[in-house]
Amino acid sequence: MKYCKRNTIRTLPLVIVTLMLSLNPDRARSAAELQPYDNYLTGPVQNSEESAKEVAAPVRTRNLAIFIFEGVQIIDYTGPFEVLGQAHDGSKPLFNVVPKYSFADMPKTDVLVLPGGGVRPHLENAKVIKWVQDTSANAEYVMSVCNGAFFLGKAGLLDGLSATTFYGLIDQLKVLAPKARVVTNQRFVDNGKIITTAGLSSGIDGALHLIEKISGRGRAQEVALNLEYNWQPDVPYARASFADRYLRKLLGAEGFKLPEGTGWTVLNQQGGKDAWEKNWQVTLNTTAPELLKLIDAKLSEGWTRVSGVANRDGAKSLWRFSDEEGMEWGAVAEVEPNEQLANSFHLRIMFARSESASK
């Protein structure tokens, strides 16, 4: 099982600590500190009469707990912390935001945020899972970021719900939470009380969505604007839905099996959910047809070769494969020599849903 490991932190000797927003008004940020951007709008923005009534209702300040642990992914907790720390109702903060509590002395939690990162050892810690279960039971909202969803899955809190996680860990979440419906086409999934977000910056979107649920879209927009964050809640962007997952799954951590010392540079890649193209520059003392044989050897582990052609100008092979829903895909692997540089080649792999499958 793999986890997000880049940009993680090591905590103080206390392995597991929490960030709980303080009830102490002397330590909490003042409304004046939170309001410099409030004057940009004359009042809350409502999308409907119903949302206007919700925003008009008194908003109480909620206790926020963020689980910080050895190996936590930095943006997974700092993103939501920054967003929720700026949220206000025009006169007071929506969340208490001063870190000071541990498992032992924390007050009742209204909102629990579970970041991801190096979660493996903590998933095996019975005290952590029991704390997640107990704290979630009494919380108003629970939000995970990245593979923080694994805490919810291990605690049995995703059973019967839809959920998502970091794009590279979708399959692992399916194993850990077999009774959940794990989706790839949403940046965050709102089940009402429990919200799961995809990886890294997705936690910012989840936190803004939480503000919208509590205090309306206008307030969430204010926070996003103040953060200079291009928040687009109605744009269906989901990294996990991109077609490159089929190539990544095929290559795995090992990648193409090329000789030691091979030069390997990703030039560019682009696509969406129905097609993808990836280009590399490869440096190796060989010919285009021989290089393609090495590429084909790896592709054949999961795809079916249809045909191929090779000549002095390069080499190309055609492939097909089926996805998890039985949809047919067509693919091309192509190697061309770089005339400007000796022993250098351009490798291109392109694949797309077949026309019949996409209809």
Image: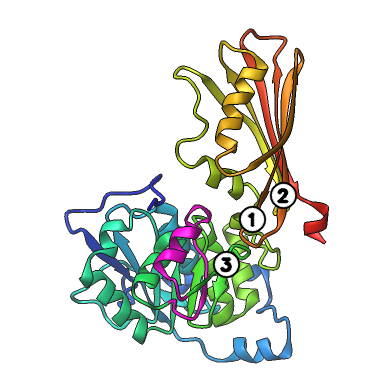
Quarter of the image holding residue 248? top right
Relative height, residue 67 to residue 336 (above, below): below
- How many angstroms separate mark 1 from mark 3 (CA)? 15 Å
Specify the segment rendered in magenta. 158-179
Q: Position of residue 127 (x, y in %)?
A: 21, 72
Query: Where residue 183 is drawn, which disc sits there?
Result: 3
Amino acid marked by disc 2: Trp
The x, y position of residue 187, in whole percent, is 59, 63
Please say whether residue 202 is visible from this viewpoint: yes
Q: Which mark is residue 338?
A: none
Pointers 2 and 1 in contact (C-beta within 8 Å): yes
Q: Amino acid at mark 3?
A: Val
Report whether 15 appears left or right of 234.
Answer: left
Pointer 1: what residue? 323
Q: Amino acid at mark 1?
A: Asp
State the separation of the CA atoms marked 2 and 1.
Answer: 8 Å
Crowding at dot 3, Cα within 10 Å, few <14 / some 14-19 / many 20+, comes out as some
Residue at point 28%, 72% (across, down): 129
Q: Is residue 131 left or right of residue 332?
A: left
78 or 303: nearer the eye?
A: 303
**Residue at 61% over, 21% down:** 291
Bin the neighbour count of mark 1 within 10 Å (Cα to Cα): few under 14, some 14-19, many 20 and up. Answer: few
Q: Nearer the viewer, residue 206 or 346?
A: 346
Give residue 113's position: percent from left, percent from top.
40, 70
User: What residue is shown with label 2?
Assistant: 329
Q: CA distance from mark 2 to mark 3?
A: 20 Å
Inspect the magenta stretch and tell me whether residue 164 lies in it.
Answer: yes
Identify the secondary structure beneath mark 3.
Answer: loop
Contact? badges 2 and 3 (CB < 8 Å): no
